[in-house]
Image: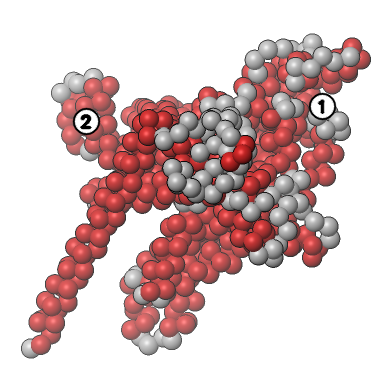
Amino acid sequence: MSTPATVVVRGARVRGRLTRRAGAGNRVAIACGVVLGLAALVAIFGPLLAPHDPNESNLANAYVGPVAGHPLGFDAQGRDLLSRLLEGARSAMLGPALVVLISVACGATLAIVAAWRGGWVDSAISTVLDIVFAFPAILLAILAAAVFGAGLTAPTIALAIAYTPYVARVLRGAALRERAREYVAASEVQGLPAWRICARHLVPNLAPLIVAQATLLFGYAMVDFAAVSYVGLGVQPPQADWGVMVATGQSGVLQGYPMESLAAGLCLVVVVVAVNLLGERLAQRDSEVSR
Amino acid sequence: MIAFTARRGAMLLVALLVSSFVIFASLDLAPGDPLSTLSGGRTLPPETVAQLQADYNLDDPFLSRYVSWLGGAVQGDLGTSIRFRQPVGTLIGDRIGVTLGLVAYASLLIVLFGVGLGVLAGLRKGWLDTSILVTSTVFAAVPSFVMAIVLLSIFAVNLGWFPALGAGDGLIDGIKHLTLPAIALAASAGAIVVRVTRVSVRSEMGREHVQTAVSRGIPSSLVVRRHVLRNAAIPVTTVVGVTITSLIALSAVIERAFGLNGLGQALVEAALSKDLAVVQGIALVMVAAFVLSNAIVDLLYSVLDPRVALGSRAS
């Protein structure tokens, strides 16, 4: 007699827990969105928000800690740290954003062409992507900087090339599944040109996955891009940039003044954590919907 | 299995050949005269110019230069470094030990702590699981060089437990010098291993054959060992392999952070000073190591999960 009742109760409890978990997940996603929105605002308006000139140095203030009007203190050359952090947000996020834009555009195009045409086109594209796969992103960026010179351009293009296979692999599988759907066959029967079916139907249906991939990729790109700037092959000092600031602050770390490196590192970590959590949430939602 | 190994071996050779070609061609892509690129823009005495002309066969067509470079590379002759004033082969030989030690140490940490904590979190729900999950989420997002700065600041400068810079001499001193770099290198990769291990253990725990075994009264330690961990090992091996492989290139950043005289440090220095012979040589070694370890991971995967080799034969 009591068995059915228990089952019902347990079922209700499980459902309650599930919705509660989804609610917590959404709250985390919203918090991440807020953090990223703030970071984007700083990246755009950072130089306007900066209370002082980020490049104005006064050696008398070297390594001076927080004082009134300078909440984070000064770096080794006596420049205002907060202003440099605000200024540095732009290059720390603009570079990775370009990387993601290029690699997602290339990866999505290659994936859809491969999935649509199949046959030798598919195997040719897959082979080329496998070869690019053999180059770790950082190594390709260092190679590019060695050949074309340090700066923003060469590492950005190199990282974009290195990430393209990752995007293309995921999207090719999804595009293949989508290609086999009936609405695609129906559109083909109606005589719609292939590019139009892809642009009007395939891409919009893949969009949630593309957005999730782009978000996750942005996190990786930020870490790798900052690493390239950190070793001295990306953004060049004295321009303020989070990766560069971790490097220039290192001599301070060894002398017991770690503020510059740690503050810049913390900025990187906060943005990357937010990006990763949001990306995972988007990817999870996409897989739930398509299931 | 043999056919799979053979096909994987052939793919490996092709990948090595193509990547060596890309690395070599990058020198030709470099804007300007290859001679001035090699010299880094400095004016060289005529005998050095003649030496370089001969070393790089600069008057020959592109393909024959590639073939002779590759022929030399196979025999360990990678040209001469202008910056370090020694053969690139010797330079690599002198420095590869530090890099190998660092990567091996970090790999050990990843296998021990990454897999260990992941299994622990996967088996025990509750506060331990939650705290491991939150910690690994944060660690996964900390760039290795930021971790290096944090470790330097805490353990080298403030507490003085470990030396800050250099690789040290001898075994004990070497381990002491490499501990902080290895932790910095392993931290974010290890956090990803923790997360993947946790999820795969958790999902194996929910599988029907595991529930059947539990309901038949088989001791839980036996169920975990025989049914959960064996099946969870398949995705875990892949992610451990992939993350360890990714350490090869990342070691360049860590070596720079801790002033270790390894391959990566030389690669970055050579890239900064446009010493392209060294860049080519070290990039070739790193890509070869990367491709080779990827192939080993694939093979391991097919040993653990025979369906992989079967599937590739069927297609």
Q: Relative to residue B217, is residue B29 depicted above or below?
A: above
Image coords of residue B145 (percent x, y): 58, 48
**Camera-nearest label, 2 or 1:** 1
Image coords of residue B127 (percent x, y): 38, 74
- Extreme left residue here? A1
Q: In the image, is B152 to the left or to the right of A95?
A: right
- Distance (Cα) linking label 2 and label 1: 56 Å
Q: Secondary structure at mark 2?
A: helix
Q: Residue at x 18, y 20 (%)?
A: A191
Three-letter code for the amino acid on which mark 2 is drawn: His
Query: Badges 2 and 1: C-beta atoms under 8 Å apart?
Result: no
Q: Secondary structure at mark 1?
A: loop
Q: Is residue A263 visible?
A: no
Q: How many marks?
A: 2
Q: Is residue B140 visible?
A: yes
The answer to whether tags 2 and 1 share a subunit is no
The residue to which callout 1 is attached is: B82
Q: Residue at x 79, y 62 (%)?
A: B173
The residue to which callout 2 is attached is: A201
Image coords of residue A47 (percent x, y): 41, 30
In the image, A42 versus B230, the foreground residue is A42
Q: Residue at x 24, y 47 (%)?
A: A290
Three-letter code for the amino acid on which mark 1 is drawn: Ile
